[in-house]
Image: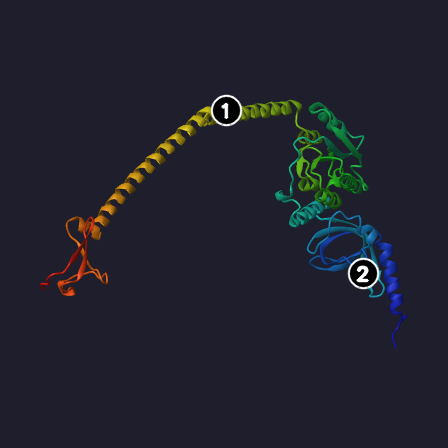
Amino acid sequence: MFDGECLTVSVLVGLLQEVVESNFMQVVVEGEISNFSAPASGHLYLTLKDEGAQVRVAMFRPQARLLRFQPENGMSVVCRGRASIYRQRGELQLIVDRMEPRGIGSMQVAFEQLKERLKQEGLFDPDRKRPLPAYPRNIGIVTSATGAAIRDILNVLSRRATGLRILLRPVAVQGEAAAGEIATAIEEMNRHGEVDVLLVGRGGGSLEDLWAFNEEVVARAIACSAIPVVSAVGHETDTTIADFVADLRAPTPSAGAELVVRNRQELEGHLDHLSQRLARQMDSRLRLLSERVTSLQRRLIPPRQRLDMAAHRHAELKRRLLQAWHHGLADNRKRAANLSAHLDALSPLGVLQRGYALVYREDDGCLVRESAQTNPGDQLTLRLGRGVIKARVTEVDP
């Protein structure tokens, strides 16, 4: 039917796999990422492409964990690995063990990615940052116990203040284990609650040397700290993620110590200022109170004078009462006299005193008002203003 040997698909793919894997054991390929996928297994899968072709790429979990940046679609990268054939689909693929961003270091990309993500979460917001205690007595330090940074810090602290309690938590400040140790130390300081402020840092170095302070685990530990944190990493030109998250950034470890503790002379000057201010306030207060006491003394009447005033008032009230009583009595007497005179004027007896008489018939005692009430021979009684006259009617003239 056909000339030549007939191969099965498996044999063909196996031959191709042998050729590819034996001739492309290590290749370096650059291209643009697309179809990026990071499943829960920890492996990474993507397509690497350029204008003319594309190839499937796989990076397994052990190598993926070592990446310092997060691959993204559209990112240009350089990959190192080996070529292989995926037998189930007969597809060419690259098994990658290293990946770097093209044109910029992976550390710088990782730095910018984490910085942007934490910024979006609000971990850099000024409102989150707490003021340092004005006069801390207990200071926690998280750094290497053997580096130059701890010597500089202790030298500054001893020069600027006395009576401080220093709690050092030694940690590795570079290497793979450093970030975890630093984060754990910050968490332990918070659990024990024995310090007023935390100074976290190290001396200068390369980006790789300072990288532990750019790790997310350290940033999260600083953000979650209930104790105010000062980040003092490297030199003035060095900037780390820890600097953005901390409550205060110091350009160097020595500067961090200066920010944490006030200078002794500065403190003494501040105390003198407070003392003088307190003295002025006390003088002002005492002067005000003295003026108030003087004013009250002027308004206060001596007890003897108050008694004399009360006696005088009592006598005056008594005089007015008696005067009112006498006036009232005189008025009442005058009124009684007027009423008596009026009654006298209205009384029949008063009329009789002016020469008139009351005439009664003696037989029945009836008051005689007219002559027709009598007959000749009637016996009459005449009541005068003084005395009584008995009379008999001899003649009646109507």
Crowd rating for badge 1 (residues with CA inside 10 Å; few <14, some 14–19, many 20+): few
Query: What residue is rendered at 72% in x and 48% in y?
Result: 101
Looking at the picture, tell me which residue is in the foreground, 312 or 273. Answer: 312
Q: In which image quadrant can residue 111 be found?
A: top right
Going by the numbered disc 2, the residue's amino acid type is Leu
Q: Position of residue 288 (x, y in %)?
A: 49, 26
Of residues 342 and 361, which is closer to you in this image? 361
Q: Quadrant of the N terminus?
A: bottom right
Q: How many marks on residues? A: 2
Q: Is residue 380 above or below residue 170?
A: below
The reply to whether residue 69 is in sight is yes
In the rendered image, residue 241, in percent from the top left (x then y), is placed at 69, 42
**The residue positioned farthest toward the bottom in the image shown:** 1
- The answer to which image quadrant residue 360 occupies is bottom left
Colouring scheme applied when the structure was drawn: rainbow
Q: CA distance from mark 2 to mark 1?
A: 100 Å
Tell whether 139 sits left or right of 5. Answer: left
Left or right of residue 301: residue 333 = left
Q: Disc 2 vs disc 1: Cβ atoms closer than 8 Å?
A: no
What's the mark number on residue 310? none
Callout 1: helix, strand or loop? helix
SS category of the residue bearing label 2 = strand
Quickly name the residue at label 1: 290
Amino acid carrying label 1: it is: Ser
Image side of residue 5 versus residue 113, left or right: right
State the residue position of label 2.
92
Q: Position of residue 169 (x, y in %)?
A: 79, 35
| Above or below for 7 versus 267 | below
Q: Position of residue 137 (x, y in %)?
A: 72, 30
- Mark 2 is surrounded, within 10 Å at the Cα level, by few (under 14), some (14 to 19) or many (20 or more) other residues, namely some
User: Residue at the spot x=68%, y=48% of the render?
Assistant: 118
Residue 26 at least partly seen: no
